[in-house]
Image: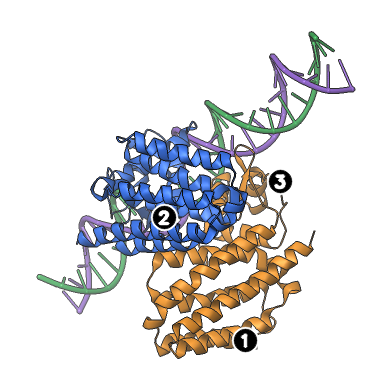
Chain colours: A orange, B blue, C green, D purple
Amino acid sequence: MPKQPAQLLYSQIKTDIQENRLPVGQALKQEMLSQRYNVSRIPVRDVLHRLKSEGWLIPCGKRGVMIPQLNATEAEDLYLMRMYLEPLILAQSIPNLNQQMLGKAADILTKLDNNKDLSIEENGELNWQFHACLYEPANRPTLFGTIASLHQQCGRYIGYHSQKLQYSNTSQDEHYQILNAISEKNISHAQAILKAHIRDAGEILVNYLNDLE
Amino acid sequence: MPKQPAQLLYSQIKTDIQENRLPVGQALKQEMLSQRYNVSRIPVRDVLHRLKSEGWLIPCGKRGVMIPQLNATEAEDLYLMRMYLEPLILAQSIPNLNQQMLGKAADILTKLDNNKDLSIEENGELNWQFHACLYEPANRPTLFGTIASLHQQCGRYIGYHSQKLQYSNTSQDEHYQILNAISEKNISHAQAILKAHIRDAGEILVNYLNDLE
DNA sequence: ATAAATTAATTTGTATACATTTTACTGGTT
DNA sequence: AACCAGTAAAATGTATACAAATTAATTTAT
C-alpha cells in the first residue's frame, strides 16, 4: 500500500518499534536511523515527528525522542477512552448501516476465522477494519479520527504480546454478538456488548502488563 | 515561552490560522509561507505536518494541506468527546487533589474574573489552565494528553468567535460550582456539573456555527 | 468545439552542507 | 574525592540545491 519512499520508511520504523528491533528507553539518533534505512536525515526527522505526535515516541531530553517503555497505565487509559468513545460513534452509525456494510463486516470476521496463521500486523489490521467499517457510516470524521488514533496506539501493545495474550477466541465471539445486535438495530444492546468487549480486552492486557514486573 | 525559531513559527502560523489571516479551503504553499515568515521550507514543512496531525490542517489534494472550513459537526464531536472523557479523568484526580491545587485553580478563576479585557488567546489559555490543573493530579498522562489535544482543537473554534459567543459569564459560574463540588470530594456531583458545563459550551458553539449558513 | 494526451510549470520531497544547540569530557579548584 | 567551569564532540535544526511528483497549460485528434 505505501508507495512513496517516506511512507515506506514510516511503516518500517513503526514495525521495527512494534517488534522490538530498536532500542527502548534511550534517544533514537537520526544519523543511526538514516544509515539503517538508507535515506537522509530529512525523511527520518519527518517520520520521527509524526510518530511522536501519534504516541509511538516520546520526548527524550531537550530535543530527542525515544521509544517509551510499555506501560500498564497507558494501556488502561487507551482502553478506557475506547470504552467510552466507541459506543458513542456506534450509536450514530447504526441508523445509517445497510445490509452491504453488515456483509462487509461479516466477511472480515470470516477472514479472521479462516486464516488462523495471520501475522501480528495482519490480524490487528483486520480487527481494526472490522471496527472501522462499523463506525464509518456514522459520518463523524473527527470522532472517527480520534478513535482510529487510539486503535493505532493500542497496536503497539497488542502487536508485541499477542502471542501470549491469545484472547482472540472470546474476542471473535463478542464480535459476532455485536454484529447481531447491530443487525437488529438494538442500539443500547450493541453499545453494551461493545463496551464489555473493549473492557475485557483491556483488562487482559493490563493484567498481563502488570504481571511483567 | 517559545524560544527556538521553529517553536515561534509554530505559534505564529497557528495564531494566523486562528485569526483568519491565511486563506481557508485552498492549498497552503510552502514557498509562500517560507517567504512570509522569513525561514526556509524545512521548518515550514515541519510545522505544517505537526499542525496537520493536531487537526489544524487537513490534506488537500495528493500532497498539500489546507485550513479546513469551520464545521459544526467537528465542533460537536470535539465537545462530545470532552463531555465523556473529562469526567473520567476528574474522577481519578479528585482523590489526589490537595488544598494547594484547589487554591491554584481558584487563583486562575480570579484572574479570569478580574482581567475582563484579556485577549482571545490569553482567555482561552487561562480557561485551559483551570481545567488542566484539575486533571493533572490524576497522573494519567495518556488520557490527559488526549484531552489536552481536544482542547487545542476547540481553540480554533473558540478563538475566532469568542467575541460573539460571550458565554463567559455562565461559564465562570459553572467553574465555581465545579470547584465547590470538588472541594467537598463529591465525585459524581462534580462529574455531573462538569459534563453539563461542557455540554452547554458545546451547544452554544454548535448552534452558532449552524446559524452561519 | 470538446476531450484526451503530451508537455511545461509549479510544488513537494530528499540529499548535502552548514549553523546552532546540546551533551560529554577534560582539567582545574575547593 | 567531589564539583564546577570551560572546551571539544556529537546531535539536532536550518538553508541551499536538486530530483520526483503533481498540477496546469497547450497541443492534437475526434
Q: Where is residue B52 shown, x and y percent of the image?
A: 43, 53
Q: Where is residue B154 shown, x and y percent of the image?
A: 38, 53
Disc marking residue A173: 1
Which mark is in front, 2 or 1? Answer: 1
Asked which secondary structure carries label 1, the reply is helix
Q: Specify the amino acid type for callout 2.
A: Gly
Question: On the rendered image, what quadrant is the C terminus of chain A found in?
Answer: bottom right
Q: Residue at x 35, y 50 (%)?
A: B171
Disc marking residue B24: none
Marked residue chain, label 1: A
Q: Specify the amino acid type for callout 3.
A: Gln
User: Does D6 sit left or right of B24 as displayed?
Assistant: right
- 10 Å neighbourhood of mark 2: few (<14), some, or many (≥20)? some
The residue nearer to you, when weighing B117 against B161, is: B117
The residue nearer to you, when weighing A132 against B74, is: B74
Asked which secondary structure carries label 2, the reply is loop
Q: Earlier in the sequence, mark 3 or mark 1?
A: 3
Please give the residue where the numbered disc 3 appears in the rendered image. Answer: A26
Marks 2 and 1 on same chain = no
Marked residue chain, label 3: A
Q: Give the Cα separation between the discs numbered 3 and 1.
A: 40 Å
- Give the answer, above or below, for where A195 lies relative to B72: below
Disc marking residue B55: 2
Q: Residue at x 67, y 72 (%)?
A: A120
Marked residue chain, label 2: B
In the image as oriented, which residue stretches furthest toward the front?
B184
The residue nearer to you, when weighing A180 against B202, is: B202
